[in-house]
C-alpha cells in the first residue's frame, strides 16, 4: 500500500465529463489499495473569468478581496469531484483551505504555505475516505482566504504530499511528461523517464511550463517524489527525483527556451565603482527581476556598455525606472529589444563534463546564429539570441547533444 | 444616524456595471451618515449554473458538497462589491458565512440560522468600515458551509439586521415594492406604502414572490422593519412593519393568486373516524404540503367526498402515495386537476370587519365564477377556482374592495 497525492489541473476538470474521468482514475488508485488524497484546480477558464471580474471592478483591487473571489473556483471543483466520487461508491469529502487548514503567510495573492494540519486528513484515511482538497488556496493569519499565485495548485499538491509524507505526488496535466525539448519545435523530442529536481527547476523557470517553479523547489526541499503525467492517456509520465535515483545520467537532459525576455543595453555608462548597483538597486526596489547581466571591459577605462534582460512584461516599467535614475547615473543611450529569446541547455551531468559550453557555441555558430548574452550556472548554460532563430537554435542544440537519438 | 442593512438580489449584482450601481447606493447611505452593512446574493444565473453542475455530477448528491459548491456564488459577489466600494473610496471588506460566523443548524441545503456573532462587525462599524456579507450561507456545527435554501439571502439580511439591531433592513430587488395585486393583471394596482408582517407573510407564501417567506417570519419575530424597494429606480418602496405603525388600516390590503396548486378529489370515501388522518398522514410522511381541505357532510352517513390541494409539482407523488394507501382506506374514485388557481384576499383589517367574505363570493358570482374550495384564516380568505378565471377574478376582487381607486 502506498500513499499517493493526485493533483489535477484546470483542463483535467474542465467539465463534468472530465471530472468523472478524474474520479475514475482516483477510483483505480484506491482499488489498488492505495491511500489517496486529491488536489484540484478550478475548472479551466473559471479563474480567468474571476480574475477578469476583479480587474473590471477595480484595477487597484484589494488582494484580500481578490483572493476571496478567485478561490471560489477551486471551491466549486472540490465539491463536484467529491459528489462524483461518492456517486461511484468512493467515500470522499471536500476540504477547503480554511477547513484543513492550510496555513499560509499573509501575502495575499502570492501567499506561501507555512504549515498544514494533517490531523483531520489522517483520521479520514483511517476510515477509507478520500480527501478532495482545494488547491491554490489557504488560510492567512488574518483568518481570511489566501491564494498562492497562478499555478499554485501544483505547490498545494506537493505541500500536501510533504505534510502527509506521501510516497508520491502525481501531477496530472495535459502533457504526458517532461520532454528533452518542446515537441512542437523538435518532433524527435523524447519524453524523459526521470529528471532531477535541479534540472526540473531550470526547465520550469525557463519556460517549460509543466510545473510551477515553487512546487519543484518545495518537492526538492522535502524530497517529495513527483510524477508528471497525462490525465487523458494511460501511460507513465516523468518522475522528478533525487539525483542518486538516476543511474545513468545524461550530460545534457534538455533544451529549454523562453520567449518572454527583453534585452536592455545601456551604452556609454561611466565605468566607476557603484555604477552597476546604482542601476540595479532601483530595479530591485521596483520588484523587477533582472536575469542575465553582461558588462564589457571598457576600452578606455572611462565608459562601458551594460546589457541585461528583464521579463518582457516589465520592460516599460524597467525603462521608466532607469530613466528616472539617469540623473545620478548618467549614460549615453538606452536600447530596448523585445525581439530576443533565451535558449538553455540543462543537465546535472555537465558538472563533471567539460566541453558542454563549447559544443553549444559551435552548434550555434555553425548555423550562423549570433550570441548576444551568455549566462551560466552549475547545471545550465543560457544564451540570448535573436527571436527569429528560436526553432533553428533549439533543433541544432537538441541534435548536437545527441538527444534526437531514440533510447536504446 | 441610523443603522441600515442593505440587501441586493441576483439581478441587482448581475454584472460589474450593476455592482457599481449597488456600490453607488451604498455610498449614498454612508455619506448620509448611516452605518451600513450589505448582504448580497450571487450574480444572476450563477447559482442556477452551480446547481446544474451538482445535478449532472450526481442526482443523489451529498447536501454538504452541494452547499460547498453553490456557496461559491455569493463568495464571488462579496469580493467584487468590496473591491468596487473601495474603488469609490468607501472602506469595505467582505465577510463569508464562516468568517463572521453565521452559525446555522446542520440541515445542509436548507439550514436555519441559529446565531450570528456580531463582535467583529461591531468593531468594523466603529472604524467606519462597511461589512459586505455573503447571503444564503452559514457555518454548520460540522465546521462546513451550509446554505439556507433558495431565496435564503433575504433571510440572511433580516437575520443580520436583527443581530445588529438595525433600524431598517432594505431589500433591493427588481420590483419597486409590494402592490395591491399583480400589476401585470391589474394595471390600476397600487404600490403599498406600508404592509403588516402578517399580510406580507400571506402575500409571500401565496406567490407574490417579493420576499422569501422565512425572511418575513424572522422579521416579524424580531420586529425588524423591512423595506422592499427597487435597485434600479430612486423612489421609496414598501415598508413591512408592525400593525400599530399603520394608522389607517385598509380592510383588504391586497389580492394574491397562486397558479402552482393542484386539486385532488377522492370520491366515495368511507365516512368513518380516522379516515382523513389515514390519507393525510402518508402525505405528510412523504413531505407533501397539503393546503386547502374540504370534506362534505355525507348524505347517507356512509360515504363522502374529500377535496384538497397540493403543490402542482408534488401532484404525481401525491397520487402515488394515495394509491398506495388505498388498500387500508378505500374510496371509489380519484380526480386530479392541475387546472386550478388559488385567489386570496388579504388584510389584517378583516379581523374587525364583517362581510369581507360575502363581498368576495358576490364579486365572483357576479362574474359567473364557480368556487371549488374555500379556506380562511384570520386575515385572509382563499378560494380555488378554474385557472382560466385567474385574471377575471383578480380584477373583479381588486375592484370590489376599492383597491383600484387612486390614493387620496
Image (cartoon, coloured by chain):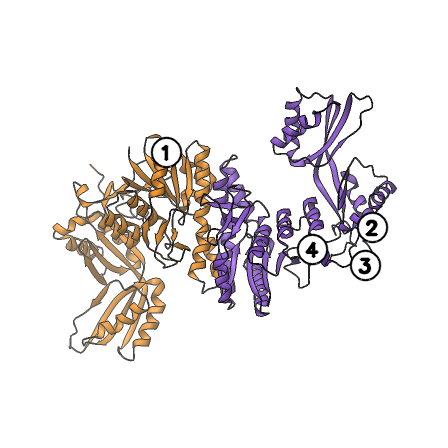
Chain colours: A purple, B orange
Q: CA distance from mark 4 to mark 2?
A: 23 Å
* Closer to viewer: mark 4 or mark 3: 4
Q: Position of residue B258 (x, y in %)?
A: 30, 56
The residue lying toward the viewer, choosing from B220 and A169, is A169
- Marks 4 and 3, the one that precedes in the sequence: 4
Chain of the residue under label 2: A
Residue in the picture at 83% in, 36% down: A370
Residue B115 visible in rendering: yes
Instruction: Check whether the beta carbons of the residues at disc 2 and disc 1 lie within 8 A of each other.
Output: no
Q: Which residue is mark 3?
A: A406
Label 4: state its secondary structure.
loop
Q: Nearer the viewer, mark 4 or mark 2?
A: 4
| Residue at numbered disc 1 | B128
Query: Which label number is shown at residue A242?
Result: 4
Q: What's the chain of the residue with tag 3?
A: A
Q: Are marks 4 and 2 on the same chain?
A: yes
For the C terminus of chain B, the quadrant is: top left
Q: CA distance from mark 2 to mark 3?
A: 13 Å
**Residue at image x 45%, y 55%?**
B68
Horizontal relation, residue A299 to residue B379: left or right: right
Image position, residue A336 (x, y; %): 72, 30
Image height check: is B172 above or below A401?
above
As measured in the structure, the alpha-carbon distance from the residue carrying label 2 to the one carrying label 1 is 66 Å
Q: In terms of depth relative to the viewer, which is nearer, B84 or A248? A: A248
Q: Are marks 4 and 3 on the same chain?
A: yes
Subunit of label 1: B
Q: Return the residue nearer the eye: B278 or A232.
A: A232
Quadrant in which the N terminus of chain B appears: top left
Amino acid at each position: 500500500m502506498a500513499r499517493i497525492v493526485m493533483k489535477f489541473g484546470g483542463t483535467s476538470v474542465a467539465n463534468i465529463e472530465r471530472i468523472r474521468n478524474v474520479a475514475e482514475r482516483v477510483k483505480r488508485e484506491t482499488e489498488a489499495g492505495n491511500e489517496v488524497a486529491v488536489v484540484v484546480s478550478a475548472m479551466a477558464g473559471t479563474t480567468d473569468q474571476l480574475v477578469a471580474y476583479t480587474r473590471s471592478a477595480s484595477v487597484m483591487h484589494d488582494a484580500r478581496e481578490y483572493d476571496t473571489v478567485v478561490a471560489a473556483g477551486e471551491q466549486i471543483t472540490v465539491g463536484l469531484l467529491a459528489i462524483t466520487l461518492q456517486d461511484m461508491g468512493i467515500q470522499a469529502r471536500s476540504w477547503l483551505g480554511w477547513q484543513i487548514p492550510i496555513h499560509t503567510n499573509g501575502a495575499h495573492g502570492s501567499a506561501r504555505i507555512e504549515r498544514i494540519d494533517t490531523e483531520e486528513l489522517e483520521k479520514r484515511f483511517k476510515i477509507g475516505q478520500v480527501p478532495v482538497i482545494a488547491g491554490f488556496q489557504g488560510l492567512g493569519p488574518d483568518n481570511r482566504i489566501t491564494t498562492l499565485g497562478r499555478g499554485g495548485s501544483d505547490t498545494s499538491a506537493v505541500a500536501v504530499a510533504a505534510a502527509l509524507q506521501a510516497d508520491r505526488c502525481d501531477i496530472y496535466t495535459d502533457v504526458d511528461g517532461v520532454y528533452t525539448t518542446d515537441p512542437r519545435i523538435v518532433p524527435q523530442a523524447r519524453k524523459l523517464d526521470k529528471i532531477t529536481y535541479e534540472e526540473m527547476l531550470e526547465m520550469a523557470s525557463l519556460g517549460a511550463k509543466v510545473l510551477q517553479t515553487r512546487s519543484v523547489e518545495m518537492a526538492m526541499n522535502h524530497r517529495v517524489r513527483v510524477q508528471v503525467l497525462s490525465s487523458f492517456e494511460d501511460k507513465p509520465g516523468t518522475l522528478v527525483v533525487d539525483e542518486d535515483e538516476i543511474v545513468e545520467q545524461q550530460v545534457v537532459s534538455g533544451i529549454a527556451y523562453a520567449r518572454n525576455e527583453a534585452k536592455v543595453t545601456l551604452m556609454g555608462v561611466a565605468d566607476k565603482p557603484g555604477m552597476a548597483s546604482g542601476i540595479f538597486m532601483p530595479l530591485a526596489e521596483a520588484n523587477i527581476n533582472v536575469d542575465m547581466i553582461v558588462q564589457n571591459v571598457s576600452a578606455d577605462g572611462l565608459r562601458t556598455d551594460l546589457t541585461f534582460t528583464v521579463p518582457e512584461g516589465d520592460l516599460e516599467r524597467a525603462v521608466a525606472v532607469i530613466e528616472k535614475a539617469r540623473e545620478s547615473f548618467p549614460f549615453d543611450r538606452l536600447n530596448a529589444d523585445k525581439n530576443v529569446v533565451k535558449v538553455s541547455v540543462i543537465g546535472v551531468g555537465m558538472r563533471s563534463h567539460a566541453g558542454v559550453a563549447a559544443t553549444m557555441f559551435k552548434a550555434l555558430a555553425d548555423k550562423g546564429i549570433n550570441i548576444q548574452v551568455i549566462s551560466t550556472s552549475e547545471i545550465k548554460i543560457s544564451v540570448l539570441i535573436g527571436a527569429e532563430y528560436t526553432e533553428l537554435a533549439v533543433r541544432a542544440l537538441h541534435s548536437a547533444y545527441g538527444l534526437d537519438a531514440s533510447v536504446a
